[in-house]
Image (spheres, helix red, strand yellow):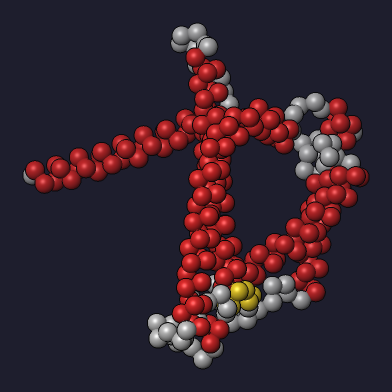
């Protein structure tokens, strides 16, 4: 997989075909949720559109696998030059960074497992209590439980009833559980990203501390991104300062 060839081309073709079908399904789902495909729609279109997107994705994957997007693709004996090139690819660099930062990220994210699990347990407990109380009150015929639609299963305090997500029908209880898990997963993912950022910054700081005084820090994507971010912040602060100074002069006149 690291070098272009027929094997990587076949793998890229399969992955590209699947990716094309997934892309058209996601696109139609977003358009359907936005109401652009009518009240009901199919997640996948007709066979013609599926064939077009699958063929386009497969073609892209096949060309990638053969090395058509390589910098050596336009040179004579480009395949031999690509195989002889020992420069780490972006994927290999990312794999090396992940292997280096992995233990620190795990150590930083490990304390977050317990609070995230506790939050998920609270969500489940609230769900069980509300649904259980609703079922009991509904069974006792309490006037507190009122169904405001023609469908009795649409009561908001029972696990029955479904939600129509642009033609995709799902049980509302299952939808609530999925939504809670997705939200907690997003929180956990943000925590992991913050751990990666802190780990990368700490490594850069340790490297800079070992340099002699007055030596500029070594160039890296993280250093370039940090410099760009600070220049953007500095520009914004100066713009705000100039704006406020102009308002101040206008008022004092």
Total marks shown come to 0
Using the rendered image of the protein, determine whether residue 93 is visible from the camera's viewpoint: no
**Residue 226 placed where, x, y %?**
48, 31
Residue 44 to residue 138: above or below: above
Classify residue 163 by image quadrant. Answer: bottom right
> Which residue appears at 62% of the width and 74% of the height?
170
Q: Toward the viewer: 126 or 245?
A: 126
Give the percent coordinates (x, y) of residue 238: 30, 36
User: What residue appears at the point 55 percent right and 23 percent down from the top-left corner?
Assistant: 203
Q: Residue furthest left?
A: 253
| In the rendered image, the vertical position of residue 145 relative to residue 58, given as above or below | below
In-front residue for pair 130/46: 130
Residue sitting at the far bottom? 150
* Residue at the farthest top position: 212
Q: Where is residue 83 in the image (x, y as percent from the top left)?
A: 86, 31
Classify the position of the C terminus by image quarter: top left
Residue 29, image quadrant? bottom right
Say which residue appears at 52% left-offset and 66% top-offset: 128
Residue drawn at (21%, 42%) of the image: 244
For residue 123, say whether it is visible.
yes
Quarter holding residue 171 = bottom right
- Image quarter where the N terminus lies is top right
Q: Could you tell whether 36 is left or right of 143 in the image? A: right
Q: Which of 239 and 161 is in front in this view?
A: 161
- Residue 83 vs residue 112, the one in the foreground: 112
In the picture as drawn, the residue positioned furthest to the right comes out as 6
Q: Where is residue 100 in the image (x, y as percent from the top left)?
A: 65, 27
């Amino acid at each position: 997989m690291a070098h272009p060839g027929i094997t990587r081309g076949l793998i890229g073709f399969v992955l590209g075909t699947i990716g094309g079908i997934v892309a058209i399904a996601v696109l139609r789902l977003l358009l359907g949720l936005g109401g652009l495909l009518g009240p009901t729609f199919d997640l996948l279109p007709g066979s013609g559109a599926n064939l077009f997107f699958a063929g386009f994705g497969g073609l892209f994957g096949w060309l990638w696998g053969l090395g058509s997007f390589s910098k050596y693709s336009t040179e004579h004996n480009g395949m031999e030059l690509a195989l002889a090139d020992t420069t780490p690819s972006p994927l290999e660099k990312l794999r090396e960074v992940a292997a280096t930062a992995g233990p620190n990220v795990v150590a930083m994210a490990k304390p977050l497992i317990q609070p995230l699990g506790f939050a998920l347990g609270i969500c489940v407990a609230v769900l069980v209590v509300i649904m259980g109380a609703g079922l009991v009150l509904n069974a006792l015929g309490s006037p507190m439980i009122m169904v405001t639609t023609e469908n009795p299963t649409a009561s908001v305090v029972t696990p029955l009833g479904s939600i129509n997500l642009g033609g995709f029908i799902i049980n509302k209880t299952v939808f609530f559980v999925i939504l809670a898990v997705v939200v907690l997963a997003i929180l956990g993912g943000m925590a992991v990203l913050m751990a990666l950022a802190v780990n990368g910054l700490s490594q850069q700081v340790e490297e800079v501390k070992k340099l002699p005084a007055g030596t500029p820090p070594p160039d890296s994507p993280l250093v370039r991104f940090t410099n760009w971010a600070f220049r953007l912040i500095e520009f914004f602060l100066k713009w705000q300062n100039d704006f406020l100074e102009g308002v101040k002069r206008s008022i004092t006149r």
